[in-house]
Structures are given as structure tokens and as C-alpha cells.
Image (tube, rainbow, N blue to C red):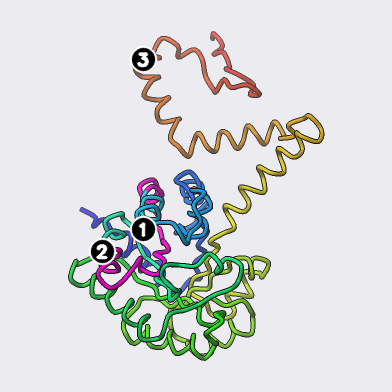
Amino acid sequence: MTEQLSPAKKLKALIETGETILVPGAHDPLMGRILERMGFTCCQCAGWMTGAHLVTPEPVMTMTEQIEAARKVAEQVDIPVISDAGTGYGEPVHIMRTVKEFHRAGIARINIEDQFFPKRASYHRGLEHVVEFDEFKRRIEFALKSREVNNADILISGRTDAGNAVNGSWKEAARRARAMKEMGVDSIQPMTRTKDCMEKFRQEFPDDDVTLSTTTYFNGLPIEEIRAYGFQMISYPLATILASVAGVIDLWKGVQETGIASFDVDKAKAVREEIEDAIGLPDMWEVERQTVEYDNQHLEGRQVAGYEGYEQKKEK
């Protein structure tokens, strides 16, 4: 019998291939399923994205809310799911529980950061603060300890915002990353806004597993250029939900202005079929065809407004 790999082991195996891994955001199970069907090998439930999806800004979102959002995605996909875990949601005892609960939810990797706790909303307008070096080390220490004492098969990434913080610097970010690697994190994640800092970080840590989070600063940077810097994972935590909201705004703004829902009929059909396939409707139709719809086997296809409708089987 083939051994079933855990989410963490699946992610570790991907990393060990040495290939650059693209990590798109998935704010709900459908997005996770669509991304998986497109061939992406993992996805991420980021804090900002989850907060936006729940209409509860990340700084006031609870551990339970973030875990449940990530769990719902993980339950519907076979690819590993990465999730933000904020600051660990408290002091060492809270951080230890955080690691255990994310593991129970089937998450492959969590990202723990060095921002203030409670988190400040001003972070999302670029006014960033980080805790003292020793406090952040303590967060990482007890996250790793929780993994050990609970035998939790989960990867832990240490994220530092010190490079952008009002009380930080690039040198401090490098210091924290170095300390995290020495402590045994699986990955380091520097939050940087410039190509210069991005390049310096890779030069400082040439052989380590480093994740680049593009947020909105590097979305326009070609993947090949980022790959050339040697980043193992390239995370796009906001792009999926930004594209989703942009699509809704564009569609309904057009309706308001023209009175016409200018969604191409052929595209609508294709998207609807993709969704139906992603959520497993064809499998259900096949079961019904063999059972409760057995007498209607002369009808084929899908009958939905805007579609061609059922095709009648021709008598031979």
C-alpha cells in the first residue's frame, strides 16, 4: 500500500525538488479547487486576504477565524495549504496552541511574524512596528517547541517585517532571519518592498529556503526575474482576491452604466462548466443517471439558461 503523505511532507517534497514554487492565494475552497485544477502545486490562506473575505480586518481577526478559513480550503484540495498564523496570537502558551490547532486543521505550513500583538491596523497603510528581537525569538522558540511536544507534522516559517518597520532596518531583518534559521525554522520570509533589499537578502542567505511574498510591490515583476534571485517560493497572497473583486466591480459597473450585463455568453458557459466540474457535479449526475434518472438517459448534456440545452439521442 502506498504511504499517504501528510500536507507538510507533500510541501517538503516539493521544496526538495529545487524547482521554484508559485503559491497563489485561495480565499475560499472554490478558489483552492480551481487553482489545483489549473496545476498549481500549493496555495495560501493569507491573513489580509482572509480578513477581507470575512469583512473582518486581519488585526482584529481571531485565531479561530483564520484556522477555519484555512481548514475549509485544505479539506477540499489535495495540494498542501500554507496559512498565515499572524504573531502566533499571543504569548508562548497561546503560540503553542496555535501550532497545534493549525496542524489539526491539516495545514502544511504556517507563517509566524514579528509584528506587535495585538496587531495594529496601521500596518495596512505602511506604518509597521515589530517587537524586540528577544520577544520574536521567544515566539519562534515556543512554536518549534509546540511542534516537538505535540508531534505535529507541520512546517514553520519565520517572517520578519523588520526591514520596513519604523523601528527596524534591513540589517535587523537579516539578524532576525539568521537567528530563525539557527533555531530551526523550515523557511524564512523577509517582507521587502524593493528589488535592492530582495537582492541583498538572497546574497546574505544564498543556500536557505526563502519565500518572497509579492503582496502588491512585486506583482508586476516577471516570475523569471524573481526566480533569478534564487527564491524557492514566490507567494502571491493578494492577487486572487484582488482579481475577483476587480471582476465583480467591472461587471456591475458596466451594468450600472449601460444596463447590459456584458459577460460574454460563451465565457459564462465555460466558467460555469469549470465551476460545476470543480465542485463535482458531473460525478453526481453519473450516480443519478444510474439510479433516480435512469428513465431519462435519452437526454444528454447540460440544460442551463444560455446553454445550447439538452441534445436528444437520435434513433438509429
Residue type highlighted by circle 3: Val
Q: Is residue 179 left or right of residue 211?
A: left
Query: Alpha-carbon distance for marks 2 and 1?
Result: 10 Å
Q: Which residue is mark 1?
A: 63
Task: Report the front residue among 41 and 249.
Answer: 249
Label 2 close to label 1 by CB (< 8 Å):
yes
Residue at horizontal 23 percent and vertical 65 percent from the top: 152
Question: Which secondary structure lies at badge 3?
Answer: loop
Tell which circle, 2 or 1, labels the residue nearer the N-terminal end: 1
Label 3 close to label 2 by CB (< 8 Å):
no
Tell which circle, 3 or 2, labels the residue nearer the N-terminal end: 2
Q: Which residue is mark 2?
A: 97
Question: Which secondary structure lies at badge 1?
Answer: helix
Query: Alpha-carbon distance for marks 3 and 2?
Result: 47 Å
Q: Which residue is mark 3?
A: 292
Residue at horizontal 45 percent and vertical 11 percent from the top: 296
Residue type highlighted by circle 1: Met
The x and y percentages for residue 278 are 48, 39
Task: Report the front residue among 198 and 62.
Answer: 62
Task: Report the front residue among 180 and 199.
Answer: 180
Which stretch is magenta?
A: 72-99
Residue type highlighted by circle 2: Arg
